[in-house]
Amino acid sequence: MIGSRGAGIALASLALLAAAVGGVPAAQAGGQARERTALECTGQENITYGPGLGLSSAGSAEVSVDGTYHCTDGSGRGSTATYHTEGKTGGGCLLLSWNRSREVLHHADGATTVIVYEAGPSVRVAGLNTALLRGEVVGGRGKGATAEKTIQTLPGSLPTDCALGGGIRHTTGLTRLSIRP
């Protein structure tokens, strides 16, 4: 069981991660206007690991992700985009240690955006895993921009699957993507 100090540290870590991703509202930024982002998206994704994630942090697992984003650009115009991600991750089902992946967004207007993620920390609190991925838009709409993606997941299987059998092979996640010029 986590003591009150451990819970406080975990909650503070999660709050720090959220602040890093979400930015500081203009009212808290000393009166400066908040930087407009090129694209802000939220969505849901289905994640598959192969082999499944177990307790061990040895080795890596292939990751395949499919999802849909609901986006708003800097002018406030809304749109949707479907996406597919392929990559590798290290770590286990309790905490991901690294991620390298390539994500292709297919916007409703037919344009594409290609993002390469190279790194990102992960925090686990009360069964909820939150990962922050940082990358760069390497092709299509927004080429040259930076990208930050936050993923919050709950395992799609029993907790015992982490230690037994083939590990956790599937989960769903809520996501937030920011693309900044």
Image: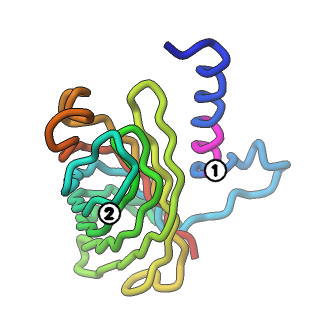
Left or right: 125 as drawn, with respect to 81: right
Q: Quadrant of the C terminus?
A: bottom right
In x, y percent, where is residue 63? 26, 61
Left or right: 47 as drawn, with respect to 115: left
The amino acid sitting under disc 2 is: Ser
Q: In the figure, 5 relative to 153: above or below? A: above
Give the overall secondary structure of the magenta segment.
helix
Quick one: label 2 or label 1, which is nearer the N terminus? 1
Magenta segment: does it hold 32?
no
In x, y percent, where is residue 61? 28, 59
Residue at the spot of label 1: 20
Q: What element carries label 2?
A: strand
Q: How is the image coloured?
A: rainbow
In x, y percent, where is residue 20? 63, 50
* Residue positioned 35% across, 78% down in the render: 113
Q: What element carries label 1?
A: helix
Within 10 angstroms of label 2, few (less than 14), some, or many (20 or more) residues? some
Q: Give the range drawn in magenta.
A: 15-20
Q: In the figure, 94 relative to 60: above or below? A: above
What is the number of callouts on the image? 2
Numbered circle sitting on residue 79: 2
Between 25 and 157, the one nearer to me in the picture: 157
In x, y percent, where is residue 56? 36, 45
